[in-house]
Amino acid sequence: MKNYLIPLFTLLIAGCGTPCPQQTYDEMLNDVVQNFNVGTVGGDSVLNVFVQKAQADSIARKYSNPAMKEEMMFDLISEYLQAGQFDNAQQLYDNMLEYAEQKYGKICPMKAMVYFEKAHIYEQSGDLENAIKMMQKSAAMFEQLPKNDFNRYEDAMEFIRMWRE
């Protein structure tokens, strides 16, 4: 086993705690390690690129802070998108939707942003019908959230308008 994977697996095992019916973030990340090592970025596997970035950013600190865990998942999704692995990115976005609802509730900025990003994957793959549906979900959720610099409601509505034309 590669030496850089040992700390990753140790942290995954240590962070699992008591089992619960819903999949925890650490279990989701373990699924990534077990099931999504597909595609390459610059000649290296997506997972290897992700692990190298995680090591550079201090794995221990990243795994101890929920916001950093979420950032790592979005980083991994980004790596899959760069490698053209849209199906894997979609699967991870689905996991992020479940995680966000578990952690923050049905209406939260994280879910709104995940819908927003999923819509762009559908758009990139030429599936405008699903892109519009996802963007509508994003807009509906952003509409219920406080208006601030992070609220992308206007952007979502603009994409829906453009894609319908």
Image (tube, helix red, strand yellow):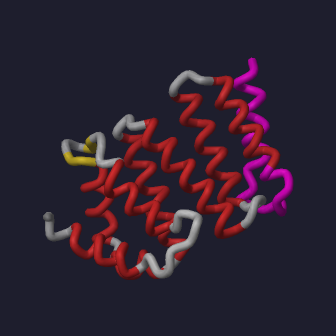
Q: Is residue 86 above or below residue 10?
A: above
Residue under the image location 76 percent in, 35 percent down: 158
In terms of secondary structure, what is the magenta stretch mainly? helix
Is 154 inside the magenta-drawn segment? yes
Looking at the rendering, which quadrant does residue 118 occupy?
A: top right
| Residue 99, image x, y percentages | 59, 62
Left or right: where 127 falls relative to 152:
left
Q: Quadrant of the C terminus?
A: top right
Left or right: where 2 falls relative to 40:
left
How many circles with numbers are drawn on the protein? 0
**Which residues, given as a range, are shown in magenta?**
141-165
| Residue 27, image x, y percentages | 44, 65
Q: Is residue 64 above or below residue 71?
A: below
Looking at the rendering, which quadrant does residue 51 occupy?
A: bottom left
Residue under the image location 51 percent in, 42 percent down: 90
Q: Quadrant of the N terminus?
A: bottom left
| Residue 41, image x, y percentages | 27, 44
Left or right: where 62 falls relative to 56:
right
Left or right: where 112 falls relative to 73:
right
Q: Residue furthest top?
A: 165
Residue under the image location 35 percent in, 72 percent down: 57
| Residue 31, image x, y percentages | 39, 57
Is 53 inside the magenta-drawn segment? no
Residue in the foreground of this view, choosing between 13 and 5: 13
Residue in the foreground of this view, choosing between 66 and 10: 10
Residue under the image location 50 percent in, 74 percent down: 19
